[in-house]
Image (spheres, rainbow, N blue to C red):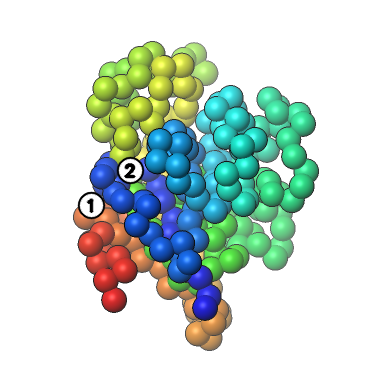
Amino acid sequence: MNKEVCIFGNGASLKDFDFQSIDRNKYDIVGCCLAFRYWDKIDWYPDIYVNVDRVVCKNPEVIEFIKQKKCQFYVLSNVIKEVWHDYPKDGTIFFIEDLLMYPMSSFKYVRNWCSGSAAVIASLDRYRKLHLFGFDCDYVEFIPECIQEEDGTLTIEKTPENNPNYFFDDYQREGDKYNIPNGKTIHMKSWEELSYIIEFINKMYPEDQCKVDITNYNSKTSISRWINTKMMGEFNSD
């Protein structure tokens, strides 16, 4: 049986989602960015970890998580090399900057991306049936607990008690640096582009074994204008 894949963003729509109920014999899992802070709490980890945010990638906790080898593969930005010189060269780490130049990768079509859309693109090289969760794209751009630095990045001054952007409140913690979300520009543009890439693949390779079947499970509008969307309760209801 060819496995399907569940790809998780970190939006608030995933609050109270039962990750551990997913049948790992049927589905592989892709997860993103700082969600390992929640995975550690429930002792549950994805097969593939994606973090191509050039600021968040440098977080020391990201490096420590990768060192624990909880996942099979990691897709990162090569900026992590600036702070982690002895990263493993064992074939488990892929850099998006290299994949963008690799003619056999679906990344060859990409011009705009965020970690979420990059997670989907990375999955296109391994899976034909994709299920998306938690890609809400309704960011509060500046939460009260952040300050803006001179270089334009944001820093969390105090761990939020209620973070509207994520499915658990301490997704971001005191001292974290990150980019302004730019949900309506960078994120939305990357998802629009992704929809064109999938449309192109399905037109060029209409055979059943090549056709991409992708579904977004979300009650929010989010990326539904480009990706076929159902309510979360419809996942695995067949």
Q: Residue at x 34, y 61 (%)?
A: 216
Residue topped by disc 2: 11
Question: Element at badge 1?
Answer: loop
Identify the residue at image location x=57%, y=34%.
65
Secondary structure type for disc 2: loop
98 sits left or right of 41 in the view: right
Q: Does residue 219 appear in the picture of this structure?
A: yes
| Dot 1 or dot 2, earlier in sequence | 2
Q: CA distance from mark 1 to mark 2?
A: 10 Å
Is 222 drawn above or below residue 67 in the view shown? below
Residue 96 in view in this figure: no
Q: Foreground residue, 41 or 189?
A: 41
Disc 1 vs disc 2: which is toward the camera? Answer: 2
Are discs 1 and 2 less than 8 Å apart at CB?
Answer: yes
Q: Position of residue 168 (x, y in %)?
A: 32, 35
Residue drawn 60% across the image and 30% down it: 64
Q: Residue furthest bottom?
A: 207
Residue type highlighted by circle 1: Lys
Which numbered circle lies on residue 220?
Answer: 1
Mark 2 belongs to which amino acid? Gly
Residue 135 coordinates in the image, percent (x, y): 35, 49
